[in-house]
Amino acid sequence: MSQIVILGSGFAALSAIRELRRQGSNAETTVISPRDELHYVPSSIWIPAGVRKAENLRLPLRRFFERHNVKFIKAAVTGLSAAEKRIDTDAGPVTADQILIATGGRFIRKLPGIENAIIPCEGIAAAEAMTAKLAGLDGGTIAIGMATNPNEPGAMRGGPMFEYLFILDTLLRRQGRRDRFKLVFFSPSDRPGARLGEKAVDGLLVEMKRRGIETRLGHKMVRIDPDRVVTEGGEIPADLILFQPGMTGPAWLAQSDLPLSPGGMVRADAGCRVEGTDAIWVAGDAGSYPGPDWMPKQAHQADLQAKAAAANIAAVLQGRSPDATFVAELICIMDSLDKGMLVFRRGKLNIVLPALRPLHWVKRMFERHYLRAFR
């Protein structure tokens, strides 16, 4: 029987499993990951307001794996040989006929003093740390910012930072203490969020001004001190710093023979096959794909890539041509705790809806619908 190994247990990995079975693949499938849980990080934005708790967002996957006849190996990947179809892990080597890399990327931690900031999208624990620190403040300055990978500008995840900015503003107003806090948004870009489209950027900047949020834009970052953000345009004293740096590929790629993009991610074609290989695939943030410069690093895009990769793996194992491709598509609802702003991009189409109360509930309903398959 053919052997498929999937690296990771996040959005791309789980979507690939479902698509493989939908395609009729009964191949022996193994997941290698340090955890057999799905961490639904998109909803961690609501932890500070108590709308969600950490335990609501950690979903055990044992039953999901059992339903789909998937073997699970608890291990961390340490390297990969495409030539030998071998995955190196801290629990020993594993070989396979087809390998899907769905481990996600990692945030670049080269900025001096970055340990003084909380990186929200690193996980649920980061949201909990931010919540605890905010609760201990009676007032002060909250600095929230983002940057990108200078070698691959599209390798970033900025949407959640806008959400944290607006959610914290709404939360502090509800608590009756917004007047004791200054909120500052910073970015080396003078047009942060450009991948969302020009209309969306204009709307975000107008909303910041309406809410009394100060902006510091267009200045390269120098370092982050425990009590301030230092840029080439000046310093931002701060009591709480949230910063989302650019993204790159997982560290173990240095111990592989895979082709890498300038930004350090695995190069793949439109069908998610790793360039120069016949049995290695990638989906989600670990990969670099052909497409528009606004193509996002987000769960929805990872799902689309995973479905294409899984369809192609199934085709290969069934003796068919692997001709599935993914659509470059950005869809997000940027939440502000009581409203949501919808942004959608596909091809030349770019739709931006203003902040509306029903869109907040649409985002919550989508969470429930998405997670139903894994509960």
Image (tube, helix red, strand yellow):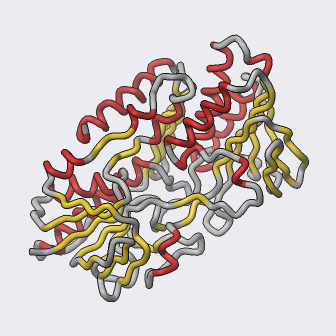
Q: Nearer the viewer, residue 57 or 208?
A: 57
Quadrant in which the N terminus appears: bottom left
Q: In the figure, 110 relative to 299: above or below? A: below
- Residue 86 is left or right of residue 109, and the answer is left
Please indicate, yes or no, whether residue 203 appears anywhere in the rendered image.
no
- Residue 143 is left or right of residue 56, and the answer is right
Farthest residue, direction right: 234
Q: Nearer the viewer, residue 135 or 107?
A: 135
Residue under the image location 11 percent in, 72 percent down: 318
Q: Nearer the viewer, residue 134 or 101?
A: 134
Q: Position of residue 209 (x, y in %)?
A: 76, 27
Please indicate, yes or no, whether residue 147 appears anywhere in the rendered image.
yes
Please state the total of marks drawn on the protein image. 0
Q: In the figure, 348 relative to 362: above or below? A: below
Residue under the image location 67 percent in, 32 percent down: 133
Q: Position of residue 345 (x, y in %)?
A: 48, 46
Farthest residue, direction front: 91
Q: In the figure, 194 relative to 29: above or below? A: above
Quadrant in which the C terminus appears: top left
Residue under the image location 70 percent in, 46 percent down: 117
Q: Position of residue 106 (x, y in %)?
A: 54, 60
- Residue 100 is left or right of residue 297, and the answer is left
Residue under the image location 85 percent in, 50 percent down: 230
